Every structure is written in structure tokens, then in C-alpha cells.
């Protein structure tokens, strides 16, 4: 079942936004979920991922120190808190679900490994 993103919008540089991604319970219970982004004319790039059960997370270098990925088990919702936003963060942000168990800290970053994708949420950061 397709996850659904929300929370995108327009913000000035230095501002913050929080994206949400809601899934059905049978998808989110034991798997990996991630955020990717795609700027116009660019490839879709990894931003962050989280192991739903273990809670460990991973970030792209561009997101480290500014973005935080988290999940709320009761709401079957994943979040991406984005602070200190820059114009280069402007992109469509996609939520993705990977239907595979991981018992280590490894988290996939390749789009080909993810099974379900949301429709995307536009984030625009003005200078």
C-alpha cells in the first residue's frame, strides 16, 4: 500500500519544516522506511532512513546535523524534521518503504532497494 507524505511547503532559508509519512500498519511494523529527494533535472537521492523496529537511522552527508528522522509507532507515521534549510534543499521529497528485515545497523540508500513509494511532497526554500 502506498505511503502518503504531507507537510511540504515554502520556507525561507534558515527556516524549518517537518514532513510526515503515514503508512498502513502491516507495512510499517517491521521494516525500513526512508526519505529521498529529487530536484528538477536531478536524480532521486537518499536523505535518511530508519529501521522501524530497531530505531537506528542513517543520513546523507547533506542532511547530517540539520535533519532528523523519527517514527511514531502508534500513528504508523514517520517524520523528517528539517532545520536550517537552504535553497539547495529545494526538491520533491519522497517517502519509501522497504519490505525486508534488518537485524544490524545497515540501512539501504539505493532507490532500487525500496518497494513502495509515496507521491512526493514539494519543499521549496527561498533565499
Image (cartoon, grey):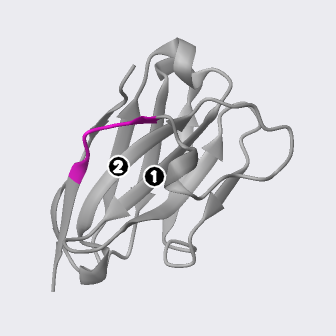
Q: Which mark is residue 35?
A: 1
| Quarter of the rendering containing residue 118 | top left
Query: Mark 1 Cα within 10 Å, few/some/many (few <14, many 20+)?
Result: many
The residue that appears at 61% across and 29% down in the rendered structure is 99
Q: Is residue 23 above or below residue 48?
A: above
Side of 67 where 102 appears, left or right: right
Q: Position of residue 31 (x, y in %)?
A: 65, 30
Q: Position of residue 114 (x, y in %)?
A: 53, 42
Side of 93 where 77 appears, left or right: right
Q: Position of residue 71 (x, y in %)?
A: 55, 37
Q: Which residue is mark 2?
A: 94
Q: Secondary structure at mark 1?
A: strand
Viewer-nearest residue: 28 or 73: 28
Q: Cβ–Cβ below 8 Å for labels 2 and 1?
A: yes
Q: Is residue 109 above or below residue 64?
A: above
Going from N to C along the chain, the mark reached first, 2 or 1, is 1
Region in magenta: 116-121
The residue that appears at 43% across and 24% down in the rendered structure is 23
The residue that appears at 25% across and 66% down in the rendered structure is 91
In space, the residues marked 2 and 1 are separated at their CA atoms by 6 Å
Q: Which mark is residue 55?
A: none
The outermost residue toward the bottom is 127
Q: Position of residue 116 (x, y in %)?
A: 44, 33
The outermost residue toward the front is 112
Side of 9 where 49 appears, left or right: right
Amino acid at each position: 500500500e502506498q505511503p502518503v507524505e504531507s507537510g511540504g511547503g515554502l520556507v525561507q532559508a534558515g527556516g524549518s519544516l517537518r514532513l510526515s509519512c503515514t503508512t498502513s500498519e502491516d507495512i510499517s511494523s517491521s521494516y525500513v522506511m526512508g526519505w529521498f529527494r529529487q530536484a528538477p533535472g536531478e536524480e532521486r537521492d537518499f536523505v535518511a532512513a530508519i529501521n522501524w523496529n530497531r530505531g537506528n537511522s542513517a543520513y546523507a552527508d547533506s542532511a547530517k546535523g540539520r535533519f532528523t528522522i523519527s517514527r511514531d509507532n502508534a500513528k504508523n507515521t514517520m517524520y523528517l524534521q528539517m532545520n536550517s534549510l537552504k535553497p539547495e534543499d529545494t526538491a520533491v521529497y519522497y517517502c519509501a518503504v522497504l519490505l525486508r528485515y534488518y537485524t544490524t545497523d545497515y540501512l539501504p540508500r539505493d532507490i532500487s532497494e525500496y518497494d513502495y513509494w509515496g507521491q512526493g511532497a514539494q519543499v521549496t526554500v527561498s533565499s
